[in-house]
Image (cartoon, rainbow, N blue to C red):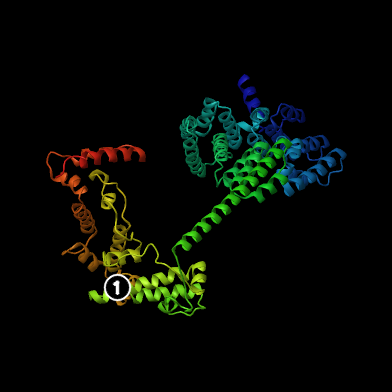
Amino acid sequence: MFQFLIIVWLQRLKGRDSSFTYDDAMYHYRIGDVQQALDIFTNLHTENSSSTAVNLGYAKVLYSCGKYKKILDLFNEEKNESISEIVENARMNKKKAERNLEENIEDLYTESPYNIDFLEKIVLKKIKKNLLVEALQLLSSKKSLVENNKKLLQLKALIFVFQDKIEAAEDIFIKEFRDNKTMKQFKSIRQEYKNIENIRDKRQRFYGLRDFLLKIDTLDLGSLLPVSIYHNIKLGALKELLSIGIHFKAKGLVPKAELYNKMADTDNSRYIYVLAYLYSGNISEAYSLVETLHFEDEKYRSSARSKILTEKQRMKEEEEEERERQRQQEEWQKQQRRSRRGTKKSDDPDPKGYYKSLGVQKTATKKEIKKAYIKAARKYNPDLIEDAKEKEKMTKKLMEINSAKSVLLDDEKRKDYDDGIIEGEEPFAQDFDQKQFSDIFSMFFGGAGGNMGGAGERLYLPRKELGRGLHSVEFKSEHMLLQLLDCLEKHKDTSTRRAAILKVENSNKTHLSLIKNFLKIKYGLEEEVTKKKLEEAQLANLYNEIKNRKLHSKLYSARNNELVSVNDSSRCLKKGSVRPRDEAVFCYIQDRNVFWGAEG
């Protein structure tokens, strides 16, 4: 008999027995077991849909669960006044939910506190506003709903995470979702964030936070959680990053500030958002924001306005200083030109034949002059000439058209020239006979013109060989042209575009097409020119030049002495972080020890 009663009782609890009464349903409803009450009322209504009491109770439970459509389907024609009122309210709430759920969620949840979707959105809203205690209280008051809903359980776990109750959160993830990876990863990220917070140098901390936020964004891409588990960490990292960035008036903070303001939604986040625009140089947008954003405390708005005015004044002063600097620079350049200018004034409309050299009229535009210069420079390129005398003529002609270009493309110089004022020789004019082919190469490809004073070759030697480790633009351009030519030749059979480029270069006998022959002649190479061979030849060329130096030849002759270690002698220049001032001292001592002794 006892066993039979137990079975009947269990069946009634599960809602499988129609013997449940109206009072049973209302009891479950009062204790918060709404799902059980809903099941009982469904059965009662199916058996006796004419009972006013059952219909009223059923309508109330459906309304508290937010099942407005079902109320309208079942009771739209109901005559009972109380039920009709519930039907009307359900119709209004259904429209509210369809029109704007986010805006009306507070009212809807008040009317239907057992609707899972409404509860989820209210809890999410409170989590995002950092009202964690209130959010947890809501979930605790709806225990029967939370236990059977994965999304609500996830929200509960997230609240524990944000409250730093890691063990409680971990317990939910493992027991309910059999997931121990999420919390393990979270602990690792949280420790990484703490390590970044402990960096004392602000700039280093800024860069660390920037990379850290990118990492979190990557992790969030694969997350199925309703709110990022890293939400609070990300919020803290964004705030710290923006605080440091604004302190240094860094640019490019606007996207991060916009995200932070969206996540935090506080007066401080809005203030930071305004400053991010301000220090990005967009003062008008910053001013617009400070006037349109809603600040609960007007002190933030006043402070932002003050910052904007200060920044406007600073930028105005900088602009004035820049204009003054430019004015002084222009005045200095004018004085320099006057000091070089000849006293003779010619009546000849083209005193030095500049227009004639370029083949343009006196009324030519800058664009026409540039075009004429390029054409003339190609025509008189000495690289294409084999005969020495003819090469010299071409070189002098190239110097003439360079002088013409420098004057005619400068508005002030051109005005003086057209007025018949003849300037003296420009200080950069060089004797092209000294370096011939190499100087023409430098003119076309950016190498440093002129002779290097002192032991300039030493600048381009590696530090481990007592050099200074700088890059020679001339050597670099040789490598670039060689690599480009090799690339075109390598792919000419597979790429019609590269084959066409190579054909045009070879047809015009450009410097690119002749680079290998040029390098063979310049460095005396007999074998095929390769990248490695060129590097070796360039290094050998530097040492050959140094051998002709009176003093530095003594230093580098030590390379052949078995008792001398060049590697050890140059250790101070290649190890550690040597300040320029310290390096200068080391070099001074080194050169003194080598050169201040006896002759020999």
Name above or below for residue 527 compared with residue 279.
below
Snapshot quadrant of residue 478: bottom left
**Residue occupying the far top of the picture:** 2
Residue marked by disc 1: 382
SS type, badge 1 = helix
- The reply to whether residue 44 is in sight is no
| Residue type pointed to by label 1 | Pro
Is 444 on the left or on the right of 371, as rendered? Answer: left
Task: Tell me the quadrant of the picture where the N terminus can be found.
Answer: top right
Name above or below for residue 144 compared with residue 317.
above
Snapshot quadrant of residue 67: top right
Task: Tell me the quadrant of the picture where the C terminus can be found.
Answer: top left
**Residue occupying the far left of the picture:** 562
Name above or below for residue 386 compared with residue 41.
below
User: Looking at the picture, how far across and down is residue 557, in whole percent?
Assistant: 16, 47
User: Looking at the picture, how far across and down is residue 492, in whole percent?
Assistant: 30, 70
User: Looking at the picture, how far across and down is residue 253, in whole percent?
Assistant: 56, 45
Snapshot quadrant of residue 290: top right
Please give the name of the residue rendered at 50% of the width and 61% of the height, measured from the top-left corner.
334
Which sits in the foreground, 171 or 472? 472
Please give the name of the residue rendered at 37% of the width and 62% of the height, measured from the top-left corner.
428
Which sits in the foreground, 317 or 411? 411
Is 558 on the left or on the right of 89, as rendered? Answer: left
- The reply to whether residue 501 is in sight is yes
Within 10 Å of the Cα at label 1, are there few (<14), some (14-19), or many (20+) other Cα atoms? many
User: Looking at the picture, how far across and down is residue 421, in whole percent?
Assistant: 48, 71
